[in-house]
Amino acid sequence: MLAMAAVVSSAVQHNYADALSKSILFFEGQRSGRLPHTQRMKWRKDSALRDGLDVNMDLTGGYYDAGDNVKFNFPMAFSTTMLSWSVIEFRKSMGSELPHALEAIRWGTDYLLKCTSVRGSVVAVVGDPNGDHTCWQRPEDMTTPRTSYIVTTQKPGSEVAAEIAAALAASSMVFRRSDNAYSRSLLKRARQVFAFANKYRGSYNDSIGSGACPFYCDISGYKDELIWGAAWLCKATKSPKYWNYVKQNTMNSVSHVVLRNVEGQAVAYYGGDVTEFGWDAKHAGINILVSKWLMRHPAAESNPFIAKANGLICSILPESPTPKSVTYSPGGLLFKPGSSNLQHTTALSFLLLVYARYMTAASKVVNCGNNVVVKPARLVEFTKGQVDYILGSNPNRMSYMVGYGTRFPQKIHHRGSVIPSMDKLPQNMQCHEADMYFKAPTPDPNLLIGAVVGGPAEDDTFEDSRYNVAQSEPTTYINAPLVGVLAHFKSPSF
């Protein structure tokens, strides 16, 4: 089994600087709203300029989550949180890409500020998901309803509000050096939105219905987002009230059994409060985030946050005797159940690399039992293997990042990439007029540079097909954690 989990070795020396640059550039291809003069992905044009008119708000801007044209604020906020965490940890490694990373974060936070501008409410989704998914249209052509779905005091949405609070708090730390006034406004709003999320508790699944489900149903519940938001506010403010909130609610609210969203179905995972992390479940991220504050304490090993963070490490590494929370492909790629697997690979790789950084600073190791002692260097090595697999060191000898390397996905599930750009085809395309481009056997006319797709199947095979959504669709939350990881491998930070 361990042999099966050994990452395919390769003499290829990957260009992490190039991959980092492209992973950030991808976010320009996902932009909604009026594009700035600094826009580098030129085939994209202005789109969704009337967003928010149905509720008398300006809701232009933000990001389309994946290959569609909906703005789902729950995963968008998570992507913004992860981009911010990437900069917080690996700012010095980003070099000339730092301004682009800051621009990507600000494109998200400017929009999230608009979505939280009316007290007692938070915009959760913009765009009718069912209508959008019926049509294959460029974002510049959209004729589907741009419905605004809002959570309120009467119809709450604690998970989406708390994740937005986390994003605003994390990003406030990012801009503290370069734009202190903006940083303060982000933090002030983060406090307000968190208070709203905590006071008016409930799931947006119930409040906005088809605006959330089945696309981004919160299966794991909203309590982890509340703790996650408080943890980020604690980090940003150093206020003991948020740390007390994290401790009290972790002890009182988080079950060992976590429900995961697997193909739209709720699947129970024992130990999920240790092993689950992504746009829906924040549990493992909370443990890693707060571990930095606790690791130097003399009794650190007995602290439940440290114990759970260590448990995550031991549940992932192939050599650990601990029961595994992941499986591996024959080529060594980490897998968890469900589609779009690379979202798990990038998110967990980020957590392991950050934990290695914290361990290094505190001169700590992780004891997994049976004489398996994990040093930070082992976590770095493991993470590098996962990143190298994504970039081309795999049985298919192909990169899963569009535009990186000589062989990469050519037929991704992405409306803007598949349909000729407005420069080539200026006439508006109605709902089904562009279906022929989806069905065409030819490569996409517009390269969504830097997009990391869902990735191969568990046997390492990959179908380069727009019809295979699980393998060929990119998302913002696949790329966002990868940004920090690539920055480190471009210029190692510890």
Image: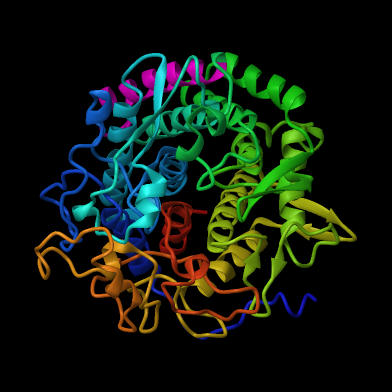
The quadrant in which the N terminus is found is bottom right
Measuring 67% from the left and 47% from the top, which residue is drawn there?
A: 260
Horizontal side of residue 182 vs 463, given as left or right: left
Question: Which percent across, then down, holds residue 293?
Answer: 62, 31
Residues in magenta?
A: 175-198
Q: Looking at the picture, tell me which residue is in the foreground, 216 or 76.
A: 216
Q: Position of residue 424 (x, y in %)?
A: 11, 70
Left of 357 or right of it: where is 369? right
* Towards the viewer: 251 or 465: 465
Q: Nearer the viewer, residue 374 or 468?
A: 468
| Left or right: 377, with 181 as reference point | right
* Image position, residue 99 (x, y; %): 26, 48
Q: Please tell me whether the stretch drawn in magenta is mainly helix, strand or loop.
A: helix
Q: Magenta segment: does it hold 187?
A: yes
Assess whether residue 66 is covered by the magenta stretch: no
How many labels, in total? Answer: 0
